[in-house]
């Protein structure tokens, strides 16, 4: 895994990925099956978002050809590769043949995504002063209609997923959008998406997604994370004049709610989280320890600059905070207390934990 600066992408990445989109994935040939996969990726017109190895004029393509590697991007096509080539033993397929039901479900998903974005960001991510092309009432009505249609499909088709009893790529592709709308719209538009009386099919769909360990245990978004993106995006896409009054108000409401949610997490029983996920989280903290300490005391931050950082003199306290966090994750099953932070470092350690909780990107 390699992280890049989204606002200053390195030259090598721009050559590998002409659209500059993220994420991208590089496949290396390891077995004959990998060779079959790469052959399909570079010759099958189904896979459009692939660095074309056959373009020998491109020095990057020549390198990939020599090293037997291929780079592709765009999430849906990446999932297609994983589904087709890297999950040969799985009886369940994410990608199913087109049927009237599948086509209709995809149309409904697209409608919800479009109407939801328009309602949540009537002026786009930025701070445009131009008036939106629709009124607030029209945007809310359009979203109502899109959600109602999706809910009717989920209810009439038996569900709980969009194409029946098993999840498919149609569910996977919409879940980030519906997560975002579920957690952000109550703050930005006073609108409730998870409403089992108004949208019972959608509520049941959310519950069914949460029952999937691979989703809930690894990639599911949460209220803190999605609300934290509201002020981050508002600041990131603000023009030279700064945030608009509307976005300032949304950001302030989101930050107040995040503060309250983080306060509620104090003293959380970590036994409610599966041990393997706690172990993975502890491993991530340990593996990124130096980077986390450096980020918390970085006086020249590249993102989320509004979050006050600690001075490098507080690094010992940050280190103790991380030790205590790892201990808490690993010792929860044993009922043993985590390593205590020294009294003189407790204040700085608390501030460091708060900074770490608010950080979304390095």
Image (tube, rainbow, N blue to C red):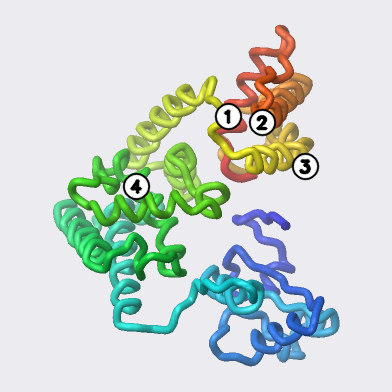
Label ID, residue 182: 4
Under circle 3, the secondary element is helix
Is any atom of residue 295 visible in this view?
A: yes
Locate the C terminus by quadrant.
top right
User: Which callout, 1 or 2, points at the residue further toward the start of the chain?
Assistant: 1
Earlier sequence position, callout 1 versus callout 4: 4
Q: Which of 171 and 110 is in front in this view?
A: 171
Q: Is residue 334 left or right of residue 122?
A: right
The residue at the point 85 percent across, 83 percent down is 66
Asked whether the beta carbons under mark 1 and mark 4 sit within 8 Å of each other, the answer is no
Residue 125 percent across, percent down from the top left: 40, 53
Which mark is in front, 2 or 3? 2
Q: Which of marks 3 and 1 is nearer the N terminus?
A: 1
Q: Alpha carbon of mark 4 to alpha carbon of mark 3: how far?
A: 32 Å
Residue at 24% x, 40% y: name it. 190
Distance CA(mark 2)–CA(mark 4): 28 Å
Reading the image, the residue beneath label 2 is 329
Task: Using the image as rendered, state which of residue 144 and residue 233 is in the foreground.
Answer: 144
Measured from the top left, where is residue 334 in percent x and y?
69, 25
Of pointers 4 and 3, the one earlier in the residue sequence: 4
Q: Residue at x 49, y 27 (%)?
A: 262
Res. 287 mark: 3
Q: In this view, does 208 lie above or below 49?
A: above
Where in the figure is residue 280, as x and y percent of width and height?
A: 69, 43
Residue 192 is marked as: none
Residue 64: image quadrant is: bottom right
Q: Which of marks 2 and 4 is nearer the N terminus?
A: 4
Residues at marks 3 and 1 touching, judged by CB atoms closer than 8 Å: no
Q: Are marks 1 and 2 in contact (CB under 8 Å)?
A: yes
Q: How crowded is mark 4: few (under 14 residues within 10 Å), some or many (20 or more)?
A: many
Mark 2 Cα within 10 Å, few/some/many (few <14, many 20+)? Answer: many
Q: Name the residue under label 1.
A: 270
């Amino acid at each position: 895994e390699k992280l890049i600066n989204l606002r200053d992408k390195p030259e090598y990445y721009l050559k590998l990925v002409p659209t500059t989109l993220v994420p991208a994935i590089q496949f290396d040939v390891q077995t004959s099956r990998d060779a079959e996969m790469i052959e399909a990726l570079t010759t099958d017109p189904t896979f459009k978002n692939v660095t074309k190895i056959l373009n020998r004029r491109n020095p990057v393509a020549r390198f990939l050809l020599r090293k037997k590697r291929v780079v592709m991007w765009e999430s849906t096509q990446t999932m297609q590769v994983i589904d087709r080539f890297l999950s040969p033993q799985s009886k369940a397929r994410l990608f199913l043949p087109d049927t009237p039901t599948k086509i209709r479900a995809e149309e409904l998903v697209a409608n919800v995504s479009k109407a939801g974005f328009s309602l949540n960001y009537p002026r786009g991510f930025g701070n445009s002063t131009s008036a939106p092309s629709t009124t607030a009432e029209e945007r809310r009505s359009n979203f109502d209609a899109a959600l109602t249609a999706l809910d009717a499909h989920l209810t009439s088709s038996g569900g709980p997923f969009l194409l029946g009893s098993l999840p498919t790529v149609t569910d996977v592709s919409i879940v980030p959008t519906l997560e975002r709308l579920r957690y952000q719209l109550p703050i930005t538009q006073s609108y409730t998406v998870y409403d089992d009386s108004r949208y019972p099919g959608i509520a049941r769909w959310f519950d069914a997604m949460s029952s999937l360990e691979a989703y809930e245990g690894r990639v599911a978004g949460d209220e803190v994370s999605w609300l934290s993106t509201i002020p981050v995006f508002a600041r990131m896409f603000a023009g030279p004049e700064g945030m608009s009054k509307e976005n300032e108000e949304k950001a302030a409401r989101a930050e107040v709610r995040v503060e309250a949610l983080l306060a509620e997490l104090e003293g959380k029983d970590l036994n409610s989280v599966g041990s393997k996920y706690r172990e993975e989280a502890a491993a991530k903290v340990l593996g990124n320890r130096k980077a986390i300490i450096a980020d918390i005391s970085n006086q020249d931050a590249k993102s989320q600059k509004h979050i006050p950082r600690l001075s490098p003199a507080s690094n010992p306290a940050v280190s103790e905070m991380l030790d205590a966090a790892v201990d808490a994750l690993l010792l929860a099953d044993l009922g043993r207390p985590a390593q205590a932070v020294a009294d003189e470092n407790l204040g700085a350690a608390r501030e460091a934990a708060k900074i770490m909780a608010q950080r979304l990107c390095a």
